[in-house]
Amino acid sequence: MTYDLNTLWFILVGILFTGYVVLDGFDLGVGTLHLFTKTDTDRRLMLNAIGPVWDGNEVWLVTGGGALFGAFPHVYATAFSAFYMPFMLLLVSLIFRAVAIEFRSKSPSPRWRQFWDISFAAGSTLSAFLIGVAVANIVWGIPLDKDFEYTGDFCYFLSPYALWVGLTTVALFMMHGAIYIVLKTEGALQAQARKWVGRCMVFFLFTYLVFNVLSVVLVPHVAYAMETRPHIIGIMLLDVLVVASLPYWVKKQKEACAFIASCLAIALLMLLFGTTMYPKMLVSYPGVANTLDIYNSASTPKTLGIMALMAAIGVPLVLTYTVCIYWVFRGKVALTKESY
């Protein structure tokens, strides 16, 4: 790996998107699990567990998108053109779940709340699924011409491989969300969430292992990366071990350790994704000559240098903001008259 400004920005963009997946992943998972509870009190507890932080978590997505636009404008232009429909669906689902969070408490009517409960769960599940579908198509590759323009259609994104990775992402976020509920609640809801952790972990490990087999067998550049970069297998095994440790931390009632381990598992998955892709950013398939990488898609060295100075100021601010929010709202969630 050559360490230059292009590589630096590949890493920085990866860190920003990893921050989004780690942080927004658990509240998307909480949304997916939302209908697994039956009482209004439990559903309110779940909403208020993510209430103070869910919108701040999405700052990482906006920041990552901005960094991608500035550092790799050709990737940004091609990706947002090619993935226009999936990204629009993702945007609608994110907006709809946000509306559901805010509107649910506006009326005590059971039907009103049930409608927004379903909306919240559907928006969260669809968001997680679409994120997985997008990642799958980046790994698999999309048809690009010599001008780096997408030549496929919407149905291309819905291959069996992409659908499976979408399911794997839903399973991952459900596991992450269940652990967060264990961390933030107590009593009957916490006991129920403890059961969810084990079931979600089995669900995720099954989908994850199948995903790895499919990637090695069906995606040539993934198999090549694993052959030439042995540390990829090490990252993969470490990730499985971290996930396997989750029931231990939950059983020992060390919820904070369990949540940190869950965050680490997702960060390792993102590291695995980045290490496998580097230096490619958007694979062209089947015409691999049209692939966008960190060099043919990047801004000028001067632009990357100026942006690096800006990032040195901006990224610590985002980190500080995130840490402050989580510190202020630490501890178990409790319902008050101001709660959702």
Image: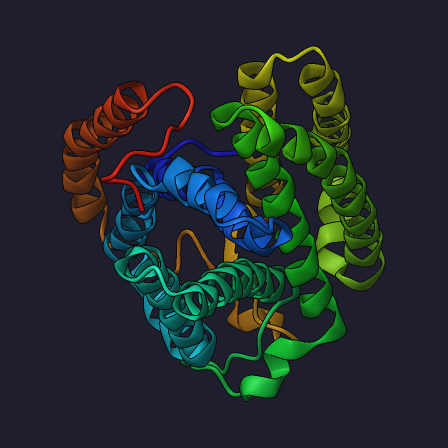
Residue located at (27% from left, 49% from top): 67
Q: For residue 11, say whether it is visible.
A: no
- 51 over 130 or under it: above or below: above
Front-lying residue, 103 or 211: 103
- Rendered location of residue 9, percent (x, y): 34, 41
- Rendered location of residue 265, percent (x, y): 62, 31
- Rendered location of residue 85, percent (x, y): 44, 80
Residue located at (70% from left, 34% from top): 197
Q: How many marks?
A: 0
Residue 95 occupies quadrant: bottom left
Residue located at (26% from left, 47% from top): 63
- 60 over 86 or under it: above or below: above
Q: For residue 8, say whether it is visible.
A: yes
Front-lying residue, 205 or 124: 124
Front-lying residue, 28 or 309: 28
Residue 301 vs residue 143: left or right? left
Residue 268 occupies quadrant: top right
Residue 338 vs residue 92: left or right? left
As drawn, the residue found furthest toward the front would be 109
Residue 97 vs residue 266: left or right? left
Q: How is the image coloured?
A: rainbow
Residue 80 occupies quadrant: bottom left
Residue located at (58% from left, 62% from top): 129
- 186 over 314 or under it: above or below: above
- Rendered location of residue 266, percent (x, y): 58, 36
